[in-house]
Amino acid sequence: MNIYHIGIKQIDGPLIVVDKVKEAHYDEVVNIITPTGNRKGRVVWIENEKAAIQVFSGTSELSITNTKTEFLGHPILLKVSKNLLGRILNGSGEPIDNLGVLEGTDERDINSSPINPVSRIYPKSFIETGFSAIDGLTTLIRGQKLPIFSASGLPHEKLAALIASQSNIKDSGNFCVVFGAIGVKNDTASFFKKEFIKAGVMDHTVMIVNTSSDPIIERILTPRIALTAAEYLAYTLNMHVLVILTDMTAYCEALREFSSSKGEIPGRKGFPGYMYSDLASIYERAGIVKTATGSITQIPILTMPNEDITHPIPDLTGYITEGQIVLSKDLVSANIFPPISILPSLSRLMKDGIGEGFTRKDHQTLANQIFASYSRTLEIKSLAAVIGEDELGDNDRLFLSFGRLFETHYINQTTKRSIIETLNLGWELLSILPRDTLTNTPSNILDEYYNNKAALLKYKL
């Protein structure tokens, strides 16, 4: 039975306080009834018989005496079914695509339940994104959480749309994407929708869109709505789900604003002290469980404030997740897309999802050699800036050529590549270098893949 209260004790920013509440629960949905219409809210704080309610659409024009609150006795629920695929929802889980109400009778608590660690299966299967810098060097594994660290002005939105459009799991046709846009501009939301329709993937994509003009509370709900849809698709319908969340910085800033409105003691840079556990409650919803054949893979995208990787948002994200893909302004300036800086990027689960049976037996060796050779290239580039390129030896000049070609041919790409094309291209570029400089590669692998004459001829070096 629903509980009604007439009148509210206090209005404080986005919060209202109701007194003499005896049976309210944290996160409970509240219907706020006013003479001018109804609003939704949720309980965010309880002390004795007082309950603070965050109003989704703000507290403007609310009256202390003429407002009635109805406690609905349940948390925020999302209606789920296979008909979610192809739909666009707002940050509260309501359809905004003019395709009618969501069908289905099954409703899920958006806060979910933690996955029992005992029931988790270790991620091992490769996901092909079509980008060589990811597939070849920071490989995404099914069930992994691999964030993208970006900065203001970098093309992370374009990269996110293309990953969502191009990604697939080897030998799996049961694949879908859940895309959560948090605090984005209206034209950005339209961009994502147009890209998915143009790529022909909208029918196996669920979009949850929260724009910068929407209520702040929806920014906090959006990733949970997205992951609730993903959990249903993965663990009930046994689908392989790729969840892309952008921008988690907008989420964290909303969390900071929400925490401040409750008068909580701030932590680093004003963010709440519980932000680590809050982010973990989102990121740890990725994975594979024994009771289902589906999986959830997460790619959260965040813009680093002031390009500072030690800022609390990327810092805490790095602790919780299993690697990171870092975007570079220098590569953007050189017209390279995707501008992935490979040296600070890594995938901690890569070694378990590549090699024979997954990609190809030489994959790990190739990645190790590319990292080593490109790292040496950057060292030589720094030296050349001091003494001049003319003073370098022949091998050093070859490394500089390798670095330029690696950035313009391997990292930069205009079309999707298969993993085999990526691996072959990697060996082709490494073959520019003298064989005795490839010290990270066993001789039997070099015998099979190294072809110096063909590489020099093709690139006219």
Image: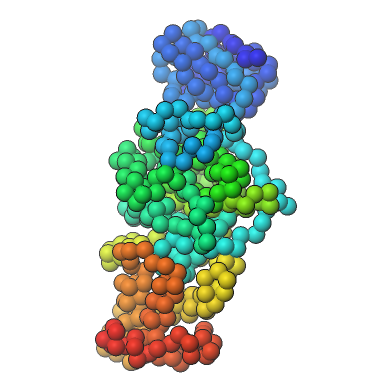
Relative image position of residue 116 (x, y in whole percent): 70, 47
- The residue positioned 27% from the left and 64% from the top of the image is 335
Task: Confirm whether residue 260 shows in the render.
Answer: no
- The residue positioned 30% from the left and 64% from the top of the image is 414
Task: Check the image and report above or below for 404 versus 81.
Answer: below
Task: Check the image and report above or below for 427 versus 184.
Answer: below
Relative image position of residue 361 (x, y in whole percent): 54, 77
- The residue positioned 48% from the left and 7% from the top of the image is 66
Relative image position of residue 276 (x, y in whole percent): 58, 47
Relative image position of residue 366 (x, y in whole percent): 48, 78
Task: Check the image and report above or below for 30 versus 81.
Answer: above
Task: Check the image and report above or below for 260 versus 443.
Answer: above
Q: Which quadrant holds the C terminus?
A: bottom left
Instruction: Tell me how many marks there are.
Output: 0
Q: Is residue 402 left or right of residue 129?
A: left
- The residue positioned 44% from the left and 45% from the top of the image is 205
Q: Nearer the viewer, residue 402 or 90?
A: 90
Q: Nearer the viewer, residue 19 or 205?
A: 205
Task: Confirm whether residue 163 shows in the render.
Answer: yes
Query: Most extreme residue toward the right, as rendered?
Result: 118
Q: Is residue 421 left or right of residue 283?
A: left
Q: Which quadrant holds the N terminus?
A: top right
Q: Is residue 220 left or right of residue 285?
A: left
What's the image's color scheme?
rainbow
